[in-house]
Structure formats: C-alpha cells, structure tokens
Amino acid sequence: MRINLFMESLKIMGLGMLGIFLVAAVLIAVMVVLTKLFPAKKEQSEDRQDS
C-alpha cells in the first residue's frame, strides 16, 4: 500500500519537474529569439575618429 503511494508521488513530482524544465526552455528560447530580432547596438570605439 505504501509503495503505491510513493510511486504516485514520484509521478506527480516528475510531472512538476518536467513542467519547470519546459518553462525554463521556453523562456530561454524567447530570449534567444528576441536577441536575434533586436541585437544590441555596438558602441563606437573612442580610438576611431570619423572625419
């Protein structure tokens, strides 16, 4: 009886951890896409002078 409850709790915990990893993967993917769409502007070097 106790082993069945333990196995059920492992299933629930596994689903919770899977959800956490999926959310993290989605957030990382969104950040990568946004970085590709809106790249950071590069600052001009002080050594280079435009005449």
Image (tube, rainbow, N blue to C red):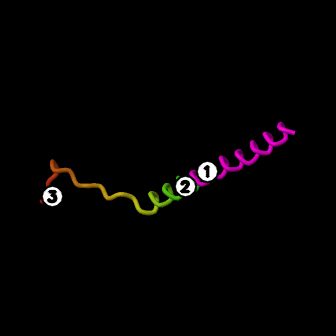
Q: CA distance from mark 3 to mark 2?
A: 38 Å
Q: Secondary structure at mark 2?
A: helix
Viewer-side label of 1, 2: 1
Residue that appears at 49% across and 55% down: 32
Q: Above or below — where is 9 with respect to 39?
A: above
**Which residue extends farthest front?**
1
- What residue is shown with label 1? 20
The residue range painted magenta reads 1-25
Q: CA distance from mark 1 to mark 3?
A: 50 Å
* Left or right of residue 14, residue 23 in this image: left
Residue 6 percent across, percent down from the top left: 78, 39
Q: Above or below — where is 37 with respect to 18?
A: below
Image quarter for residue 2? top right
The number of numbered discs placed on residues in the rendered structure image is 3
Q: Which image quarter holds the N terminus?
A: top right
Q: Amino acid at mark 3?
A: Asp
Which callout, 3 or 2, points at the residue further toward the start of the chain? Answer: 2
Residue that appears at 14% across and 54% down: 49
In front of the other: 48 or 17? 17
Residue 5 percent across, percent down from the top left: 81, 42
- What residue is shown with label 2? 29
User: Which disc, if any, is residue 50?
Assistant: 3
Q: Main secondary structure of the magenta part?
A: helix
Answer yes or no: do the residues labelled 1 and 2 have beta carbons within 8 Å?
no
User: Which disc, if any, is residue 30?
Assistant: none
**Which residue extends farthest top?**
3
Which callout, 1 or 3, points at the residue further toward the start of the chain? Answer: 1
Residue 18 within the segment the image draws in magenta: yes
Residue that appears at 58% across and 51% down: 25
